[in-house]
Amino acid sequence: QWQLPGELDAEPQPAPSLRLVPRRPALDEDTDPAVAERPTGSADLPDPGPWVAQLVQAVLEVLARERPRQQLVRWLAPEVYAELSSHVAAAPAAAPARGGGLARRTVSSVHVSEPADGVVEASAVAVGGPRARAIAVRLEGWDGRWRCTRLAVL
């Protein structure tokens, strides 16, 4: 290990601490600060449990073609919205269940974990139809609201 003169007597400096909360994104000179997206901490956001349940129910309704997917554009990250849109466009229309109606799926339970400030990872169980479905979501606080940045329906 090489040392420069004067460093022999210097006390070792502690390594910088690990930041678990992302820093605010640096704005380039072309970005208007009025429209820049900013991370939001959990203290400034609504309770994630009921919010996850409502979002998952809305996603289930979009998948069942009971709700227009455009209603979710504000709450989904662009890549999640694009993936949901392509899935809905490619999937055949649901066949009616016995009895003449569609089996409506509803959220039966939600489990929430907060691995970092402004980040929620949650799982939900949807019942209805021939089997239960598991849904996993990751929410991040952006611009004073929760936004879904990952979505998996199993």
Image (spheres, grey):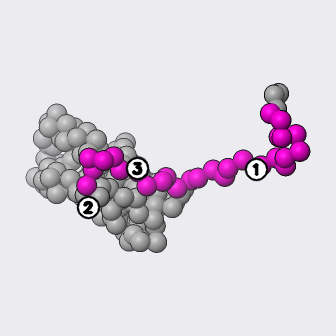
Sequence-first tag of 1 and 3: 1
Q: Amino acid type of disc 3? A: Ala
Find residue 34 and name its label: 2
Tell me, yes or no, whether the highlighted magenta stretch contains residue 126.
no
User: Does any portion of residue 126 appear in the rendered image?
Assistant: no
Mark 2 neighbour class, 10 Å CA radius: few under 14, some 14 to 19, many 20 or more:
few
Secondary-structure class at tag 2: loop
What residue did someone put label 1 on?
14
Contact check, label 1 and label 3, Cβ < 8 Å:
no
Vertical order, 142 against 86 (above or below): below
Determine the main secondary structure of the stretch shown in magenta.
Answer: loop
Q: Amino acid type of disc 1? A: Pro
Give the CA separation, mark 2 to mark 3.
Answer: 14 Å
Query: 59 left or right of 93?
Result: right
What residue did someone put label 3 on?
26
Q: In which quarter of the image is the N terminus?
A: top right
Residue for point 34% across, 53% down: 148
Q: What stretch is highlighted in magenta?
A: 4-32
Residue 5 is situated, as x and y percent measured from the top left of the image, at 83, 35
Q: Amino acid type of disc 2? A: Ala
Vertical order, 95 against 60 (above or below): above
Secondary-structure class at tag 3: loop
Sequence-first tag of 2 and 3: 3
